[in-house]
Amino acid sequence: MSKSAEPELSYWRYIAGVESADQLRASRRPRILAWTAAPESARGDIVVIYGKSPVQAYVAVARQCHDPIEGSGDRHWTWLQIQPLKEGLAETRVSTGARTRDHRGLKKPAGGSYNRIEAGAGRGDFLRMLTSGDNVARSRLEKWSGGRSPYPHVSTAELRKAWWEPPERDGLSDDHEQSLSDGVASALVCRRDAKWLDEGGIDDYYLEMHLKTKDGRDRYADIVLLDARRGGTLILVEVKKHARPTAGHDPISQVLTNQKALRRKHKGWRVRCVAVAVEFRQETLDQAKRDNVECLRCDAKGGCLRPA
């Protein structure tokens, strides 16, 4: 199909409450989140996320990973592939721009949860303003707009069950292991053991990365990062609140299975296996030693990493 025959993408401004906006401002880590969407939007559309008062700034760029699906309430939902901005773009800069001031879709938000940003010189000025000095966001936006970036593997079942409720200020509840994964990934990078994947030119999602086994079964790696100390090496991390040698709680067997699948997906990379948990059973530590899997303890939020 010629480029001219490809469907034109729509651009949207989605409004975020202060809790959601603060979550995106806290870290530049890319992520995938379920989000309420415009019913007329579509897979591949480009989104800018605006934090309403008192934030009053654009905080992230994103791409819709799925056509909107009506959830359990009266809202439509999609998965957004999100890249937080290096610095938020204040709404006052947009509202005083020569071509963005009166542009349809960029006027000061006044109610509602979304609006379409119409094509035109104003939109071009706005996108350049949004990513000025932010090479990561600009690169992702260019790849998404040009259809040169693969879509992550996402589930529509969760969207059909989605129901809007005020987000928790600290993100996911403490007893959910994904909240631990978020903290563990940040801690590994902060202590310079690891780097984010895009620093090594890998355009993939670091958290809950989708993998496939040799026989075609779906797998999900909790965390995949670059090894900052060993070139050509990925760090594959399995996170548990309580690690023990029982089904669903055994990080050693899971990380070794995922290691094979990760090598198949990213050929040519070595893979270092790590298990992280708040609490380890001794049997699990013994198995990890036999299978050469590094074990680290963390606190209830995924930080304070130390040898197990």
Image (cartoon, rainbow, N blue to C red):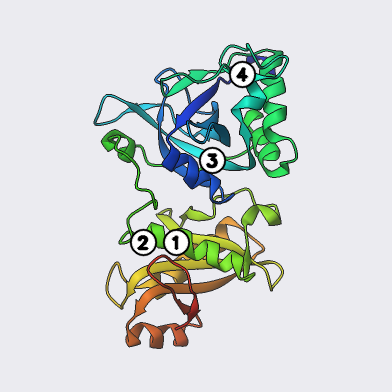
Q: CA distance from mark 1 to mark 4?
A: 38 Å
Question: Does the residue at mark 2 contact the one at mark 4 (Cβ under 8 Å)?
Answer: no
| Left or right: residue 57 compared with residue 42 | right
Mark 4 secondary-structure assignment: loop
Q: Is residue 294 visible?
A: no
- What is the x, y in percent for residue 245? 30, 78
Q: On the image, which quarter does residue 106 sit in?
A: top right
How dense is the environment of label 4, judged by Cα within 10 Å: few (below 14), some, or many (20 and up)?
A: few
Instruction: Quickly name the residue at label 3.
Output: 82
* Mark 4 lies on residue: 6
Q: Which residue is mark 1?
A: 181
The first of marks 3 and 4 along the sequence is 4
Q: Residues within 10 Å of mark 1 (few under 14, many from 20)?
A: many
Question: Mark 3, residues whose alpha carbon is within 10 Å: few (<14), some, or many (≥20)?
Answer: many
Q: Nearer the viewer, residue 130 or 267?
A: 130
The crowd level at tag 2 (other Cα within 10 Å; few <14, some 14-19, many 20+) is many
Is 166 placed above or below 243 here?
Answer: above
The residue pinned by badge 2 equals 177
For marks 3 and 1, the one nearer the N-term is: 3
Q: Answer with mark 1 or mark 4, whichever residue precedes in sequence.
A: 4
- Which amino acid type corresponds to the residue marked 1 in the rendered image? Ser
Front label number (3 vs 4): 3
Percent from the top left, x then y, of residue 273?
52, 73
Q: Residue at x 26, y 37 (%)?
A: 161
**SS of the residue at dot 2?**
helix
Q: Nearer the viewer, mark 1 or mark 4?
A: 1
